[in-house]
Amino acid sequence: MLPWFLFFIGLAVLLVAARYFTRSAERMGHALRLSPLMVGVVIVALGTSLPELISAILAATKGSTEIVTGNILGANVSNMFLILGLITIISTRSIFLGEEYIFIDLHFMLGSAMLLAYFMWDGSLSLIEGILLLAGFAIYQLHLFTSEKPGEMPVLTDQAEIEEVRSKHGPKDYVILVLSAVGIYFGAEYTIESIVDIAHQFSISEELISVTALSLGTTFPELFVSISAVRSGHAEIAIGNILGSCIFNALAVAGIASIINPVVVPPLMQEIGLVFLLIAAFFFYLLAQDKKISKWEGMLLLLFYVAFFLRICGFM
C-alpha cells in the first residue's frame, strides 16, 4: 500500500503548496497595484489550475502522457458535473447567469471542449495540435484583457481588503512564494511517480487512476474557490472559475503537455472520457440558456457524474 500512501501524501503537498502559492502571489499582485481583474484572471485562475498544469508537465516529461489525458478529461468532467452540481445545491437560491462575460466564457468553454475532442479523437495529440490549442488559449486571454467592460467582472476581494493586504505585504510573501513553488514541484513529482508505481504493482491503468483519484484531487482548489464565492453571494464568480478552469485545462494544459511530448489518448479515454467531456460541455451550455441553474438541475449534474465515475471504473 506504500504507493497509495505516497500518492495521497504527494497530492496533499501539491494542493497545499498551490494554495500558499496562490495566496502569496495574490498579495504580491495587490501590493504591486495590479488591477483586481489582472489578479483574479491571471494569478488566482492560474493558481487554482497549477496542480493540473504541473502534473501534466511532469507526466509528459516522463513519457506517461496517458496520465495527462486522464487528468484533463477527468478534471473538466468533475468541474462541470461534480463541482457545478455541488455549488448549485449548497447555494441558497438558483444560480443566475445574467452577466455578459459568463456567456462569452461559456462559448469559449464549449469551443475548447469540441476542439480538444476533435484533436484527441484519433488517439493522440501532436505538436502541431498542441500549438493550435495554445493559440486558442492566447485568443481567450486577449478577450479577457480587451473586454469592453472589464470593470464589471466581479471579484471576491473588496477594496478595503486590498488596502489591508497592501499594508501587510512584506519579504515573507516572496519566501512563501519560493517555498510553495518547490512544494508544488515535489508534490507533483511524487504524485506522478506513485501513479506509475500503482499502475505497475496493482495492474491498474495509469489513465484510470488519473481520471478518477488524480483529477478529483487536482480540482479541489476550484471547489474551494467556488464554495467560497457562493457563500459570499458571488455565485457568478464560481461559474466563471469553473468555466475558466475548463478552458485552461483543455487549451493550455493539453497544449503545453503535447508540445513537450506527443500525448497518447488511450481507448478508455476515447470511448468514455471524450464522450462525457462533450456531454458535460453541451449540457452545461444548454442549462445556461435560461440564465439560471436550479437545485434540481444541480442534482441532475451530480447524477451524471456518478454515471461517469461508475462507467469509467467498469461498473456499468
Image (cartoon, helix red, strand yellow):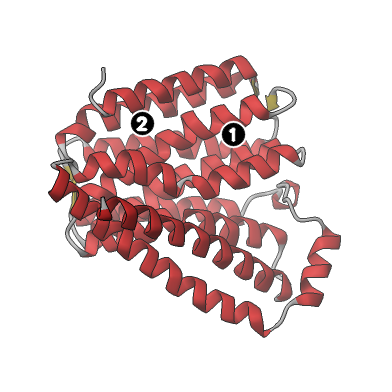
Q: Which mark is residue 28?
A: none
Residue 81 point in image, percent of width and height: 47, 28
> Residue at horizontal 71%, vertical 60%?
36
Q: Is residue 135 visible?
A: no
SS for callout 2: helix
Given residues 143 and 153, the one toward you in this image is 153
Compared to 283, does 217 lie above or below? below
What residue occupies the far right of the structure in this picture? 160
Does residue 296 lie above or below 191 as drawn? above
Residue named by callout 1: 103
Whichever of labels 1 and 2 marks the residue nearer the N terminus, that label is 1
Q: Position of residue 153 (x, y in %)?
A: 70, 47
Position of 214 with respect to 168 (left or right) is left
Q: Position of residue 283 (x, y in %)?
A: 46, 22
Type of amino acid under label 1: Phe
Residue at image coords 19%, 54%: 197
Q: Determine the residue located farthest toward the bottom in the rendered image.
A: 171
* Quadrant position of residue 92: top right
Residue 43 located left or right of residue 270:
right
**Residue mark closest to the camera, 1 vs 2:** 2
What crowding class fits label 2: few (fewer than 14 Cα within 10 Å), some (14-19), or many (20 or more)? many
User: Can you tell which quarter of the image residue 228 is in?
Assistant: top right
Residue at left offset 72%, top offset 51%: 155
Which residue position is annotated with label 2? 277
Where is the C terminus found, in terms of image quarters? top left
Give the CA separation, mark 1 to mark 2.
19 Å
Q: Tell me what residue is drawn at x 55 percent, y 67 percent.
A: 21
Q: Is residue 218 above or below residue 76?
A: below
Q: Secondary structure at mark 1?
A: helix
Q: Between residues 1 and 30, which one lies in front from this camera angle?
A: 1
Q: Amino acid at mark 2?
A: Leu
Q: Position of residue 299 (x, y in %)?
A: 55, 18
